[in-house]
Image (cartoon, rainbow, N blue to C red):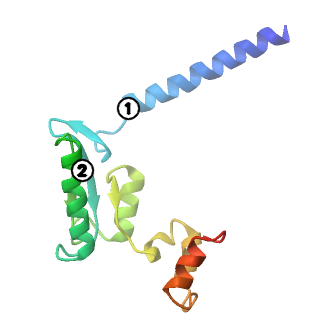
Amino acid sequence: MNQTRSFFTAGLMIGLLAACILGALVIRPKTSAGPDVGARGIVLKLAHGLDEAHPVHQAMTLMKQRLEELTGGKATIDLYSGGVLGGETDCLEQVQKGELAMTKVSTAALEAFIPEMKVFSIPFAFRDETHFWNTLHSGVG
């Protein structure tokens, strides 16, 4: 009797899990930023607050080009620079909501979302860059 009940319970749980997964796929919001598969293929949205002349933005442009090359144009990244979609906190919230696929933020902006990031805001916590990287690659990091 207990074995029958266990099989029934396991089957019920598997069925409920499958229903939840399928339900999430069916009722997924249309505004979801990642990945949107349509006429353009897969389109990821990436927003940040840096100027287009900034080296980080230029690296993101290169990443977009390489992605398009490697996927034969089936995937791309729409870049939004200069804070046009909001500040760092706004962009992080949009990532949480699924409105953005990616963002680039400073560690200070991450502190509200990941309290452990506060360690990087402690002044003079690291003697030099080598000390920083050694700490990051140790058990502490």
Residue 109 sits above or below residue 9 on the image? below
Residue 11 sits above or below residue 77 on the image? above
> What is the residue that sits farthest to the right in this orientation?
1
Tell me the mark number nearer the camera, choosing from 2 and 1.
2
Quadrant the N terminus occupies: top right
Front position in the image: 56 or 92: 56
Q: At 56% from the left edge and 84% from the top edge, which residue is drawn? A: 131
Residue 114 sits above or below residue 71 on the image? below
Q: Is residue 121 visible?
A: no
Instruction: Name the secondary structure under disc 2.
Output: helix
Number of the label disc, if any, that sits on residue 99: none
Front position in the image: 2 or 64: 64
Specify the quadrant of the image occupied by residue 141: bottom right
Q: At 81% from the left edge and 11% from the top edge, which residue is drawn? A: 3
User: Which amino acid type is shown beneath numbered disc 1?
Assistant: Ile
Query: Is residue 86 found left or right of 9 in the rendered image?
Result: left
Instruction: Name the secondary structure under disc 1.
Output: loop
Q: Earlier in the sequence, mark 2 or mark 1?
A: 1
Residue 102 sits above or below residue 86 on the image? above
Query: Is residue 49 found left or right of 107 in the rendered image?
Result: left
Q: Residues within 10 Å of mark 1 (few under 14, many from 20)?
A: few
State the residue position of label 2.
67
Marks 2/1: CA–CA distance: 29 Å
Query: Is residue 34 found left or right of 106 in the rendered image?
Result: left
- The x and y percentages for residue 101 are 33, 52
User: Which amino acid type is shown beneath numbered disc 2?
Assistant: Leu
